[in-house]
Amino acid sequence: MTFADRAAHNEELFRTINERIEEGAKQHGVDQSLPFHCECCNESCLEKIELPPAEYDRIAAQIERFVLVPGHERADVESVVEQHSSYLVVEKTGEARAEIEREHPRPRHSD
């Protein structure tokens, strides 16, 4: 498994957890900031990012975009497309992006 494959798999794992947080917030009408997991390439990362569920939904609506703690970005597999005070939004590039597009399990993107 290549680094891009491992990175995409790890990010998808964190994305799945975050989407469950988001779904729970929607079900219970929660709109204040909640702790979402950093969706970086590092499989041992346990850092959290405080975001309103609607903001997370906006970011995750694009298959190739992920939310990260500043400093966790990797220029070899992603580029920063948004910078905020407590988080970054990155977009996958190259083989990492191709892997996400090939293997993406999220139902919101199955249209």
Image (tube, rainbow, N blue to C red):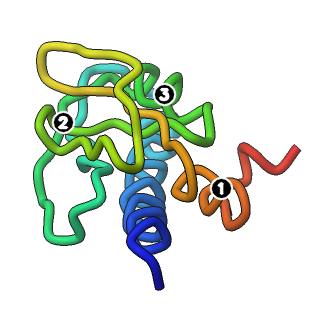
User: Where is 111 relative to 51, above or below?
Assistant: below
Give the residue pinned by disc 3. Answer: 59
Residue name at image x 46 percent, y 70 percent: 9
Q: Position of residue 22 (x, y in %)?
A: 44, 41
> Which element carries disc 1, helix, strand or loop?
helix
Alpha-carbon neighbours of circle 1 within 10 Å: few (<14), some, or many (≥20)? some
Residue name at image x 14 percent, y 32 percent: 70
> Which element carries disc 2, helix, strand or loop?
strand
Estimate the spatial distance between the alpha carbons at disc 2 and disc 1, rounded to whole Å.
Answer: 26 Å
Q: Position of residue 55 (x, y in %)?
A: 41, 20
User: Where is 41 relative to 37, above or below?
Assistant: below
- Amino acid marked by disc 3: Ile
Estimate the spatial distance between the alpha carbons at disc 3 and disc 1, rounded to whole Å.
Answer: 19 Å
- Amino acid marked by disc 1: Ala
- Amino acid marked by disc 2: Ile
- For residue 98, the mark is 1
Left or right: 85 as drawn, with respect to 17: left
Estimate the spatial distance between the alpha carbons at disc 2 and disc 3, rounded to whole Å.
Answer: 13 Å
Q: Position of residue 59 (x, y in %)?
A: 48, 27
- Between tags 3 and 1, which lies in front? 1
Alpha-carbon neighbours of circle 2 within 10 Å: few (<14), some, or many (≥20)? some
Which badge, 2 or 3, comes first in the chain's sequence? 2
Left or right: 67 as drawn, with respect to 84: right
Front one among 99 and 76: 76
Residue name at image x 24 percent, y 25 percent: 33
Give the residue pinned by disc 2. Answer: 49
Left or right: 92 as drawn, with respect to 81: right
The reply to whether discs 3 and 1 touch (Cβ–Cβ < 8 Å) is no
- Between tags 2 and 1, which lies in front? 1
Q: Position of residue 39 (x, y in %)?
A: 32, 50
The reply to whether discs 2 and 3 touch (Cβ–Cβ < 8 Å) is no
